[in-house]
């Protein structure tokens, strides 16, 4: 890579969305060294102002926005927007960190979790870097130290994903339907979810594929094999649950050699980005309520499996809007700034 971040000028595309708002919070919290921040969204949002620090920043319209004056663009406005505008930003000399599924599976685009495969940035010639699926990020941050120590052969995973994964409209639909149920009113027909989400669990997320798995489930398989190890077999069920924010996952992994509970716990306690919450005597384990609004990947319920072959189980929880999207993107931005020359 030949360019440098000469001025740390950043554009945030999708500033009005759920992830965009959290990106602004994290940029401010971490005092990211940006000399300027441009908020970019659709034409209908242009002219609105959002608070950033002690300033109000005006949203600019994406169709007329020039990336030539930016060093880095953070994209989180949907795959269709990224498909049209991320290559435009790249062509104008801007680096792009894309939070959608648009570029994740292209062989020349790095798919990066800083705690897992930061080196992928250094080997790429492209100016676009993809941010993985929110559940994939949490699962692989926790799986990485286990794989490094004993080798993972296969993973069986069930995710329990919050409605914030469906954006602001997903949260609003849960809130509205929950209020209607509690008041004894008829529940509105769903518009964001396939069925009523209030007080419910929906055993599918995204479109069904020809193999009867959903695209959300296949994302975790594809991304695990691209990021961690192409030889790992992955079997997944993704469930949408009536939780506002914070994704959870039950992970069962088959490993190359046995690992005791204490050994696994010690590996996880030393792992970057992981916080172990695991005290069965006190009924302590990670929950979405506790994880929401915080940065770590929380791991609990650590225990060897009951199969005759070596296996390990644990429970993983993270804030899907923070580590699962905004924070991971900003961590990539720091890596990118450190590695381009």
Image: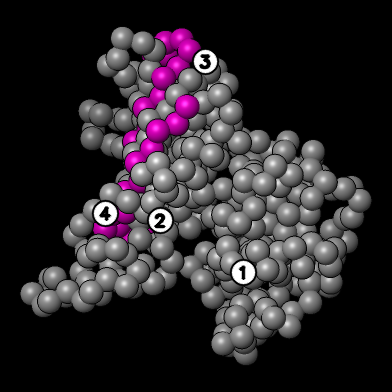
Q: Is residue 55 visible?
A: no
Position of 4 compared to 264: left or right? right
> Label 4 to label 3, Cα distance in Å?
35 Å
Q: How crowded is the residue under tag 1: few (<14 C-alpha within 10 Å), some, or many (20+)? A: some
Q: Are marks 4 and 1 in contact (CB under 8 Å)?
A: no
Question: In front: mark 4 or mark 2?
Answer: 2
Q: Is residue 48 visible?
A: yes
Q: Which residue is mark 3?
A: 150
Q: Which comes before the other along the chain, label 1 or label 3? A: 1
> Label 4 to label 1, Cα distance in Å?
28 Å
Label 3: state its secondary structure: helix
Label 4: state its secondary structure: strand
> Label 1 to label 3, Cα distance in Å?
41 Å
Q: Main secondary structure of the magenta part?
A: strand
Q: Which residue is mark 1?
A: 81
**Looking at this rendering, what residue extends furthest in the left direction?**
184
Q: Which residue is mark 4?
A: 202
Q: Are marks 1 and 3 in contact (CB under 8 Å)?
A: no
Residue 234 x %, y % = 45, 31
Q: Which residue is mark 2?
A: 206
Question: In front: mark 1 or mark 3?
Answer: 1
Q: Quadrant of residue 163?
A: bottom left
Q: Which comes before the other along the chain, label 4 or label 3? A: 3
Residue 287 x %, y % = 32, 46
- Foreground residue among 33 and 118: 118
Q: Which comes before the other along the chain, label 2 or label 3? A: 3
């Amino acid at each position: 890579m030949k360019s440098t971040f000469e001025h740390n000028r950043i554009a945030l595309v999708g500033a009005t969305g759920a992830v965009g708002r959290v990106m602004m919070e994290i940029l401010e919290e971490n005092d990211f060294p940006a000399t300027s921040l441009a908020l970019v969204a659709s034409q209908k949002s242009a002219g609105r102002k959002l608070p950033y620090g002690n300033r109000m920043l005006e949203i600019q319209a994406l169709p007329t926005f020039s990336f030539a004056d930016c060093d880095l663009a953070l994209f989180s406005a949907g795959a269709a927007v990224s498909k049209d505008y991320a290559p435009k930003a790249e062509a104008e000399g801007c680096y792009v960190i894309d939070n959608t599924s648009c570029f994740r599976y292209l062989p020349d685009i790095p798919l990066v979790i800083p705690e897992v495969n930061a080196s992928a940035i250094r080997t790429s010639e492209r100016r676009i870097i993809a941010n993985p699926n929110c559940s994939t990020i949490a699962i692989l941050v926790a799986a990485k130290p286990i794989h490094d120590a004993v080798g993972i052969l296969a993973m069986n995973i069930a995710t329990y994903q919050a409605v914030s994964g469906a954006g602001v409209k997903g949260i609003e639909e849960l809130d509205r339907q929950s209020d209607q149920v509690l008041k004894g009113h008829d529940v509105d027909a769903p518009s964001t979810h396939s069925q009523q989400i209030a007080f419910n669990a929906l055993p599918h997320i995204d479109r069904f594929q020809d193999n009867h798995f959903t695209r959300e489930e296949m994302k975790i398989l594809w991304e695990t094999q691209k990021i961690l190890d192409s030889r790992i077999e992955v079997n997944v069920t993704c469930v949408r649950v009536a939780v506002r924010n914070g994704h959870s996952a039950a992970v069962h992994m088959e490993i190359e050699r046995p690992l005791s509970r204490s050994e696994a716990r010690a590996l996880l306690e030393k792992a970057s980005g992981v916080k172990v919450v695991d005290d069965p005597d006190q009924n302590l384990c990670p929950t979405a309520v506790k994880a929401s609004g915080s940065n770590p990947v929380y791991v609990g319920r650590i225990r060897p499996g009951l199969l005759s072959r070596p296996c390990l189980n644990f429970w993983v929880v993270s804030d899907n809007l923070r580590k699962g999207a905004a924070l991971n993107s900003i961590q990539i931005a720091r890596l990118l700034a450190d590695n381009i020359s």
